[in-house]
Image (tube, helix red, strand yellow):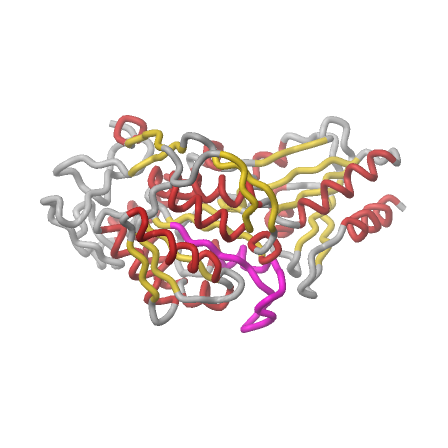
Amino acid sequence: MTLSDMTLMKLSKPHLPPGEYYFSGNEAAAVAAIDAGCRFYAGYPITPSSEIMEHMADKLPNVDGVFVQMEDEIASICSVIGAVWAGAKGMTATSGPGFSLMQEALGYAAFTETPLVIMDIQRAGPGTGQATRTASGDHMQAKWGSHGDYQVISFCPWSVQEMYDCSIQAFNLAERYRVPVIVSAEEAIGHLRERMTVPDKIHHENRAKQKGSAPFDTEAIDGVPPMPAFGEGENLMITGSTHDGMGFRKTEDPDCHQKLVKRINLKILNHRDLIVETESVFTDDAELLVLSYGFTARSSVYAVNQLRQEGFKVGLVRLKTIWPFPENILKDFGGVRKILVPEMNLGQIVGEVKKVFAGDVIPLNQVNGEVIRPHSIIEKIREVYR
């Protein structure tokens, strides 16, 4: 039996009337979570994500959901893990310092294959940093913040509409692959207000169940075991120690550990092409690519359009998904010799590009709490051409 045989898919109506709304990115994420079936939220207020928590506190009771304000971010993510194993779809939201506190539990969730969603609305760090300013410095933390070898899925939306769309997709992929999914948006997107559309139907994916089967092992080619919940008559042991298919601790068994760790990684990496999403423009004849993501991609689009009008052979690749990294996309542009990577950090995704691209990879970094504006990208490209 494969994943497609077991996963439950359905269509439902959104909890708001379909149509256009004028939302902030944070509001759109909260609306999407409810539409995706989230019925449990545990969190602790932290700028610039607090509006997500406020919206969930206000709206979850209207759909028979549960909201809990916890004493800190460690308790928040642990509460979500518990609610998910009780059968709910659950999420939390935070920013850099709170995301740091969640890392041990994030690794536990990955190892126990617990599907949950984290909204990380990034701000300028490190430390407390600038709580109200924008940045894009949590991407390495999202992937490598906990120890050991594991995978997560991480989106980087660039608009209020994508905050809505990516949040729904985050819940669906969490359920499909039994994995933590992170929506890694910047403050600039979380607090941006613009029009977005709520559709008339929402596509839901719900975790697969198969009575009596092992919840932590499978022979299916997709590598995703069915997931029961407490209270359904299954004997469940959920441990962060090495475990066999039934959850029994096997902390001295090298073969068991290797089999488990490889499977929880391969179930994501083997489906990379189904998970990652990118957009490309002006790439057919491009000599130089701008690889961008999140809010910075908005400036990059303007810059590329401007330079095209001036005769520069410049193209754009926009990442909607950061993790797993869409490395295969960079193999499709044979004529490209240079890639510019503008980032609101000192160089995080640029390192991933250098791993897979043989040409020149040029960073453009900014960490002053401001968005990267189009003229900075335009001037950098002109400098490269000179």
Residue at 11% across, 48% down: 235
Q: Is residue 190 shown left or right of residue 69?
A: right
The residue nearer to you, when weighing 219 against 253, is: 219
User: Residue 105 colored magenta?
Assistant: no
Q: Which residues are magenta?
A: 117-141
Between residue 39 and residue 319, name the one nearer to us: 39
Tell whether position 140 is magenta: yes
> Could you say where residue 324 lies in the image, as x and y percent from the top left?
49, 43
Q: Is residue 258 visible?
A: no
Front residue (pair 99, 21):
21
Residue shown at 85%/34% (left/top)?
Answer: 309
Determine the residue positioned at 34% across, 47% down: 38
Instruction: Identify which residue, 364 or 51, lies in the foreground.
Output: 51
Q: Quadrant of the N terminus?
A: top left
Q: Position of residue 234 (x, y in %)?
A: 12, 45
Q: Is residue 284 above or below residue 49?
A: above
